[in-house]
């Protein structure tokens, strides 16, 4: 089966940071796939912008090398690669200097009025410069869109500065704040599952749901991002955006329609309903960890401090939190969140754990009756499992078993699961903001994160050590076990 794609309108896409890691690993491969799928019109153009001095040909050669690796196992991608590279151009520009901007504007405006996407895949410190210059050169036309990547600030105040600067040049309807987790197939499937089925919504509340778990575990360490990561840490890098966005998708009320503001209004209400974690509460509602030397994917790996070369860093590489959404639907239902680097496995999943049955008709010999669970696997092996109690097949008494009704998307649909950036980039061109964060969402998320950060600062204790390749500090296990619960483990 092949996925159906509708072509988007012709566009010019400018990637600031066009020689960077994100451009080469995610954006350009994603665009190549969309092009090979027939979604990008032939007269569209992609312009890489960075400080390095090089011409179009040199840039194409560099990108071509990176994309040849992406296309290695795919004949269609290989066949379309030369034509894709023809669409690429390059311009050397320094966002902090005037030089070159006239030429840049002339080159872009030469194609007349068309959709222009400015993707700021740069350090956030350049956002203000770039946006000011785009405005000064008349490039913030009605058909322009600007895409900004996280981190959008490191707290509420700095996020407001960035949002003001970008907002000074572009209207909110032109600003696309990307959270690539929202582009993952299974995250969008959560919308389908919740709102295209009658089964779940009546049960989707505190009277039927015991708790929710959201895990985003990674096996990688610093990956050459030490400079950024050490000033960020897991709470800012992952929880403020990805995990809170997932929480919103689980907890929001049904929007009236699948329209950008209808969805974002509902997510905002969730963020604003999060019960603050302040002062001494952090000690029993949060766990910070930092990995020590251990093993990852079978190989010995150094600890965070050695990898960083800075023995006194207190940056957390793991965080677990017990969050609560303080509203009518979710009163008393904990949302346990955890994320970390150098964990035992790369797995991202959302677990909806339902309450126990009120009364059991079965003898003890049948075994325990476990609560139903709905598990959405974001990656790898995208799919949905619904854990049910069934009778153990065969004669010899009635024994119960907890087994999953298992739907693997790869097996069910057999299509290539598009990478998050593929969908999101096409949504930007189409002007669809549903899967992007609005300014007030980003700020509400920071408003919940800020007090946790300052409470950690006041505690002045070091993050708890954990061995690389484990599931994080034992305190994270205790965080859920104190409530008589355990982290979900997939046993089938
Ligand atoms: C990024 C974080 O936003 O998400 C990284 O900055 C993290 O630290 C990455 O590794 C994880 O994304 P994915 O799609 O690989 O789960």
Image (spheres, rainbow, N blue to C red):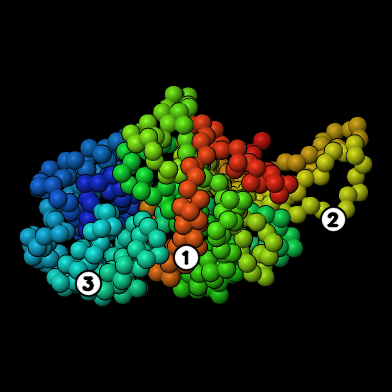
Residue at 58%, 50% in the rendered image: 283
Instruction: Tally the marks.
Output: 3
Residue at 25%, 44% in the rendered image: 81
Q: Is residue 111 left or right of residue 185?
A: left
Q: Position of residue 44 (x, y in %)?
A: 23, 59
Q: Does the closest atom of ligand 1 sit within 8 Å of the Cβ of label 2?
A: no
Q: Nearer the viewer, residue 207 or 467?
A: 467
Q: Earlier in the sequence, mark 1 or mark 2?
A: 2
Q: Is residue 264 left or right of residue 94?
A: right
Answer yes or no: is residue 29 visible. no
Crowd around label 3: few <14 · some 14–19 · many ≥20 (10 Å): many
Q: Is residue 434 above or below residue 186?
A: below
Q: Earlier in the sequence, mark 3 or mark 2?
A: 3
Q: Which dot, 3 or 2, sits closer to the camera?
A: 2
Q: Position of residue 220 (x, y in %)?
A: 42, 36
Q: Nearer the viewer, residue 313 or 317?
A: 313
Q: Position of residue 472 (x, y in %)?
A: 54, 38
Q: Is residue 229 above or below residue 125?
A: above
Q: CA distance from mark 1 to mark 2?
A: 39 Å
Q: Which dot, 1 or 3, sits closer to the camera?
A: 1
Q: CA distance from mark 3 to mark 2?
A: 60 Å
- As drawn, the label of residue 140 is 3
Q: Is residue 138 left or right of residue 237?
A: left
Q: Is residue 383 above or below residue 453?
A: above
Crowd around label 2: few <14 · some 14–19 · many ≥20 (10 Å): few
- As drawn, the label of residue 28 is none
Q: Is residue 325 left or right of residue 357?
A: left
Query: Considering the numbered disc 3 on the image, is that residue within a helix, a strand or a loop?
Result: loop
| Residue hosting label 1 | 447
Residue at 26%, 74% in the rendered image: 168
């Amino acid at each position: 089966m092949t996925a159906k794609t509708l072509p988007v309108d012709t566009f010019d896409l400018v990637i600031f940071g066009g020689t960077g890691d994100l451009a080469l690993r995610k954006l350009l491969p994603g665009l190549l796939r969309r092009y090979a799928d027939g979604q990008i019109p032939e007269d569209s153009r992609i312009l890489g912008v960075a400080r390095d001095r090089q011409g179009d040909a040199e840039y194409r050669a560099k990108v071509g090398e990176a994309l040849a690796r992406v296309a290695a196992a795919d004949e269609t991608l290989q066949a379309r690669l030369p034509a894709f590279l023809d669409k690429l151009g390059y311009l050397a520009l320094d966002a902090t200097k005037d030089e070159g901007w006239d030429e840049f504007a002339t080159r872009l405006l030469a194609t007349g009025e068309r959709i222009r996407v400015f993707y700021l895949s740069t350090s956030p410190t350049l956002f203000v410069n770039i946006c000011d210059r785009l405005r000064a050169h008349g490039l913030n036309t009605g058909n322009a869109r600007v895409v900004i990547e996280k981190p959008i600030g490191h707290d509420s105040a700095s996020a407001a500065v960035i949002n003001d600067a970008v907002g000074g040049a572009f209207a909110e309807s032109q600003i696309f704040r990307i959270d690539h987790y929202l582009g993952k197939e299974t995250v969008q499937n959560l919308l389908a599952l919740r709102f295209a089925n009658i089964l779940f919504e009546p049960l989707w509340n505190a009277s039927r749901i015991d708790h929710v778990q959201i895990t985003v575990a990674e096996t990688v360490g610093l990956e050459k991002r030490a400079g950024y990561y050490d000033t960020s840490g897991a709470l800012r890098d992952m929880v403020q955006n990805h995990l809170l966005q997932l929480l919103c998708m689980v907890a929001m009320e049904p929007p009236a329609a699948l329209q950008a503001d209808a969805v974002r209004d509902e997510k905002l209400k969730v963020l604003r309903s999060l019960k603050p974690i302040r002062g001494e509460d952090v000690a029993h509602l949060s766990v910070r960890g930092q990995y020590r030397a251990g093993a990852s994917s079978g190989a010995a790996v150094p600890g965070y401090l050695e990898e960083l070369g800075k023995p006194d860093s207190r940056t957390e590489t793991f965080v677990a939190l017990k969050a609560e959404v303080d509203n009518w639907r979710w009163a008393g239902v904990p949302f346990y969140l955890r994320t970390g680097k150098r964990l035992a496995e790369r797995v991202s999943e959302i677990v909806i754990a339902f309450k126990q049955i009120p009364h059991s008709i079965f003898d003890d010999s049948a075994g325990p009756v476990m609560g139903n669970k709905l598990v959405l696997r974001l990656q790898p092996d995208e799919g949905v499992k619904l854990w049910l109690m069934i009778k153990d097949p065969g004669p010899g008494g009635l024994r119960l078993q907890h087994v999953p009704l298992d739907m693997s998307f790869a097996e069910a649909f057999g299509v290539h699961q598009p990478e998050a950036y593929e969908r999101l980039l096409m949504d930007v061109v189409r002007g669809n903001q549903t899967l992007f964060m609005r300014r007030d969402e980003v700020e509400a998320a920071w408003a919940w994160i800020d007090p946790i950060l300052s409470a950690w600062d006041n505690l002045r204790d070091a993050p708890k050590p954990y061995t690389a390749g484990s599931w994080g500090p034992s305190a994270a296990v205790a965080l859920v076990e104190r409530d008589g619960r355990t982290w979900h483990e997939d046993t089938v």
